[in-house]
Amino acid sequence: MSDKEKQVLEDGDDAIVVEFTDEEGNSYLYEQEMIIPVNGEKFALLIGVEDEEHEHEHGCGCGCEEGDEDVLIAKIVTNENGEEEYVEPTDEEFEAVQKAYDALLEEEENAEE
């Protein structure tokens, strides 16, 4: 995730929307789907939000041409101003979050049976 957090927006239904800007100045919106706690730290599962400004063109880098959902995992840290920021997790953190998420899905499936 070489994108840098630009700002966190909140819409009327308490959803948290995060705007990332890449090195080329392209802006992408992600909605925070859930928080996954791992080893005392918080990680956000972020789902890409299509907006009017981002016209999906082939080669835009968001994965839209493959039909895949645009999903990120970001570590939530507190900066020196006491504000939360979203940063790229290490490979080890990413793997731990992925395992925790898979375990959550398995628990939900078992609860539904």
Image (spheres, grey):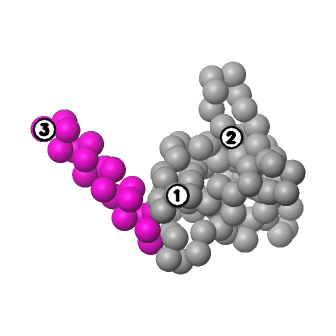
In this picture, which residue range is highlighted in magenta?
Answer: 95-113
Name the residue furthest top.
Answer: 12
- Please state which of residues 39 and 26 is positioned toward the viewer in this rendering: 39
Real-space Cα separation, disc 3 to disc 1, in angstroms: 30 Å
Is residue 74 toward the left or the right of residue 67 in the image? right
Q: Is residue 107 magenta?
A: yes
Name the residue furthest front.
Answer: 40
Please tell me whether mark 1 sits on a helix, a strand or a loop. loop
For marks 3 and 2, the one nearer the N-term is: 2
The label shown at residue 100 is none
Position of residue 17 relative to residue 36, above or below, is: above
What residue lies at 19% left-to-right and 36% top-to-bottom?
112
Query: Mark 1 is on which residue type?
Result: Gly
- Numbered disc total: 3
Real-space Cα separation, disc 1 to disc 2, in angstroms: 23 Å
What residue lies at 20% left-to-right and 38% top-to-bottom?
111
x, y percentage for residue 46?
58, 50
The residue tagged 1 is 40
Residue 62 in which image quadrant? bottom right
What residue lies at 58% left-to-right and 75% top-to-bottom?
90
Bin the neighbour count of mark 3 within 10 Å (Cα to Cα): few under 14, some 14-19, many 20 and up.
few
The residue tagged 3 is 113
Tell me the quarter of the image containing the C terminus.
Answer: top left
Position of residue 52 relative to residue 55, above or below, is: above
Tell me the quarter of the image containing the N terminus.
Answer: bottom right
The label shown at residue 17 is 2
Q: Are marks 3 and 2 in contact (CB under 8 Å)?
A: no
What residue lies at 60% left-to-right and 69% top-to-bottom?
89
x, y percentage for residue 19?
75, 49
- Please state which of residues 65 and 33 is positioned toward the viewer in this rendering: 33
Q: Are marks 1 and 2 in contact (CB under 8 Å)?
A: no
